[in-house]
Image: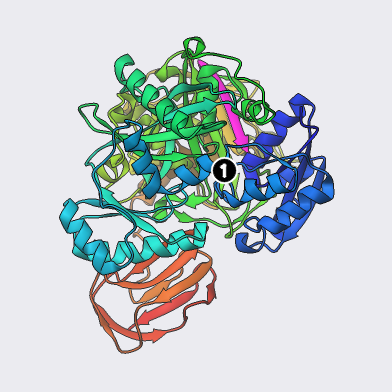
Amino acid sequence: MFKKILIANRGEIAVRVIKTCKRLGIQTVAVYSEADADSMAVQMADEAVLIGPPAPGESYLCLDKILDAAKQTGADAVHPGFGFLSENAAFPKALEEAGIGWVGPNVNAINAMGDKIRSKQLAAEAGVSTIPGADGEISDVETAVAASKAIGFPVMIKASAGGGGKGMRIARNKAEVEEGFVSARNEAKTAFGDDRILIEKFVEQPRHIEIQVLGDKHGNTIYLNERECSIQRRNQKVLEEAPSPFLDKATRKAMGEQSVALAAAVDYDSAGTVEFIVDKDSNFYFLEMNTRLQVEHPVTEMICELDLVEQMIRVAEGQELPLKQRDVKIKGWAVEARLYAEDPYRGFLPSIGRLKRFSMAPEGKIADGELRIDSGVREGDEISLFYDPMIAKVIGYGKNRDAAINALSASLDRLHIDGLQSNAPFLSAVLDERDFRAGQIHTGYIEEHFPEGFHGTAPREEQLLYLTCAAAFVHETFLRRAAQIDGRITPYIEPETREWVVILGGRRISVEFEMGEAGDRAFVWAPALGNERIELTTGWKPGMALFEGRIDKTDFALEIADRTEGYAMRHRGFSAVALVCTPRSAELQALLPEKVKADTSRLVISPMPGLVVSVAVEQGQSVKAGEPLLVVEAMKMENVIRAEKDGVIKTVNIEAGASVAADELMIEFD
């Protein structure tokens, strides 16, 4: 077995590979940029080598630097993780010439499948169902428009190289092709160093289902069932699960066998993924093959009880697969959420900064299932603008789909992050939706269910009950603590019952509250919520950011923070500030005028730190609402900033190539 493996990656996947290597008794080498000097992966690895500045093009994408690090440390193999150089065939070729092992597929397979144009041709030759599209590379905007018209709108414009949703655009008309082609090509060049583009027919409301394959160097290839990856935003996966709630046994078998046929056609000898789009009638079409480990591989590991990283290492050493196709089973259900540092209330813009607080439920049993967390960051770490904004992959597992979803939801309820925003409220909202629970999903699910973006969810009655009880308990606890301060002239006498009005989410909820003697339980009456006497038990103490409690036999958890006025609270997709008032104070509160928001419609402010890629307007120019003003790149994604209304440009304060900070004024209208 390999004695020392260098991980040519960063973040959670580097940590993931290190964990398996440690279990197998293999030493590890981490490579890192200046921005990752204090990262978890660097601290966990046996050795670490600095390879350059933060920008990936000067560090993680520099083949020579990583090769030098492998030679310098005496590593006898390299695991590429995913992204960066993982699908660059020049990498394993250079390692082979240096006598260093490669924990991945052979060069020919990477070359064949890494080019989406060539891979589609090979798939057709191998008998795999393929989607209609233009033949070959699309070289310019005019050709893109002509090809799109010939295929028929809508079309998918996508990079020939790479993956992960980078360099992909859906176009429904000529204008969207013209804009999407340029953006997709720019993103592809930045992310993969390859700006070739292809165009295919876009199937309306498709499912994105992928098959995990595993091959060895002895001609054995199997498929490890499927993953449902249809919940996406901007072509990037948000939630994944295994198995799919849609596939029947016959379709699973057909997709699996076609995937194995394609893998066999290129002598595939590692873990890889064949991706398909599937229509409502179960017709499936080849999308691409990723010749690497997928981000969402944990859900497959959970239901197959297999460590894919370990299997990749063993295959790279020349070992045969330990199981045959007949041995592959489906045990339980797993659902993964990608926890990102982004603000769902502001169009999911990246939220860059330091994790001042970061805590989650511990791995292991939770609700009626189990919890797994794959993360490469800890409390105190920084989420940088140079890399993917992932904080963690959170995986719920259970005996069935409902149990897995409930485990995942319960874990997100117990998440606390301070210092930056996360997409946790949005993830929880999707997991709670009726259509998602019913498995009625497709790749346009988010756009369909959140057409105006995400602005939180309306509270359900049980949520109002949790929040009301928690707010009243916290308020009573603070009152009790304040009354017990040393030096009071008169002793504090606890009344048997208090009357409060909890103002929450536009509702005024009258409650009667009685605190237990030990301060760990209370009795609450909330007639407006249809409840009589409720017993609340909790271990919450002042200073805790999470309120975990039980009402009768139901456990719940929510975030809570003391504010100058009231308590900021979040439970799943619902967030609000709760005010706990006496009945008279509540009457007076209703008389207060609402604050008028400042008019910022004339200002174009940077929503995040980033790099200005291009500026499309100049001083004195008239623009219409919806027209692009500029493009800001952050975390490897281009964000088009558009005019919110018609107007004339008064000043342009930035230029292409400039760096901007969050909330920096970029453009002003007359």
Q: Does the stretch in magenta take in 343?
A: no
Question: Residue 562: which quarter of the image?
Answer: top right
Asked if the magenta segment contains residue 373, the reply would be yes
User: Which of the two residues, 2 or 491, is positioned nearer the viewer here?
Assistant: 2
* Whether residue 621 can be seen here: yes
Residue drawn at point x = 45 percent, y = 42 percent: 113
Which quarter of the rendered picture does the N terminus lie within?
top right
In front: 193, or 494?
A: 193
Q: Position of residue 255 (x, y in %)?
A: 35, 25
Q: Is residue 552 above or below residue 259?
A: above
Q: Residue furthest top?
A: 326
* Amino acid type, mark 1: Val
Identify the residue position indicated by label 1 in the image. 107
Question: Residue 457's image quarter?
Answer: top left
What is the residue that sits farthest to the bottom in this orientation? 620
- What element does badge 1 sit on? helix
Which residue is pictured at 46% across the width and 76% down the height? 665
Image coordinates for residue 152, horizontal then vertical, percent: 16, 52
Q: Position of residue 391 (x, y in %)?
A: 58, 44
| Vertical side of 286 occupied by 593: above or below | below
Q: Nearer the viewer, residue 667 or 73?
A: 73
In the picture, the quarter occupied by the C terminus is bottom left
Q: Please indicate whether residue 226 sits to the left or right of residue 412 in the image.
A: left
Magenta stretch bounds: 367-375
Pinpoint residue 385: horizontal percent, then vertical percent: 57, 60
Q: How many marks?
A: 1
Magenta stretch: dominant secondary structure = strand
